[in-house]
Image (cartoon, rainbow, N blue to C red):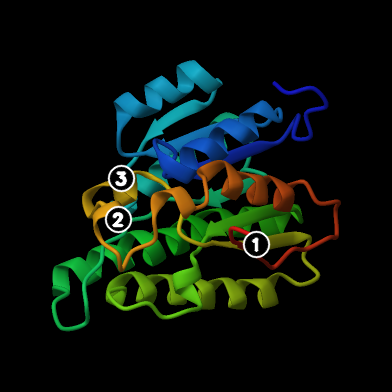
Amino acid sequence: MSEGARLVGKTAVVTGASRGIGRVVATRLAAEGARVWALARSKGALDELAAEAGVEPVACDLRDDAATWLALDEIADRSGGVPDIVVNSAGVFGIESCATETVNGFDAQLHVNLRAPFLVIRAVLPGMLERGSGTVVSIGSVAGRKAFPGNAAYSASKYGLRGLHEVLVEELRGTGVRATLVEPAATDTELWDPLDPEQNPELPSRTDMLRPEDVADAVLFAVTRPEGVIVPVLQVERG
């Protein structure tokens, strides 16, 4: 736990916590004193994270509705209520044009990048509203506000997430519950490994990308704002 920890007494759920941005966010929130439940499909990676950061691992496939609801219900039972903080960080990414993307590939990205965040929000939001507090952070993308060739499915999912978030912000006004969309530019995570951007001049170089720690800093900023302060959108780019 870091000196002057700002989240002591808070509970948090982070999806996609086994790698990339989600892993760093879970680690950062735990270091700030939060009790963190880390959700992901990979039990082995979660167990490693638990040993390193002191989070509580929950193996869960967000593509499985029943398993997701059950996991969130169990967390609520163990923590005494819905979490104070939810970070929707699970995501998938691939590059295909509108002419070459498959229906299955399109559906897969919408399911993880858009439907799963809605499912998580739907599960925790009634409890947050009843309590009158809570923060929902969703990890969007620059591709959710700017078109890039080859992002047929990914942009559809991230533009959709932005739309969902903007409705959520309006619905939450005056409730004590707040929502933030963090939109990073290209970030150097394992999602880029199959694409090998250093060998493709049309893709950004990994050396020029954001680091997961940069995005985690933005998440931490959002969730540590004083009560009544809302940060609807945080766009994170390299200077």
- Callout in the foreground (1, 2): 2
What residue do we see at 78% from left, 28% from top? 5
Residue 223 relative to residue 228: left or right: left
Q: Secondary structure at mark 2?
A: helix
Residue type at numbered disc 3: Asp
In which quadrant of the rendered image does the C terminus lie? bottom right
Q: CA distance from mark 1 to mark 2?
A: 29 Å
Q: Which residue is mark 1?
A: 180
Task: Please name whichever residue, 149 or 41, is drawn nearer the observer in this view of the structure.
Answer: 149
Image coordinates for residue 199, horizontal then vertical, percent: 24, 55
How would you rate the neighbour count of disc 1 (Cα within 10 Å): few for under 14, some for 14-19, many for 20 or more? many
Q: Which residue is mark 3?
A: 61
How would you rate the neighbour count of disc 2 (Cα within 10 Å): few for under 14, some for 14-19, many for 20 or more? some
Residue 200 relative to residue 18: left or right: left
Image coordinates for residue 116, horizontal then vertical, percent: 39, 59
What residue do we see at 15% from left, 68% from top? 104
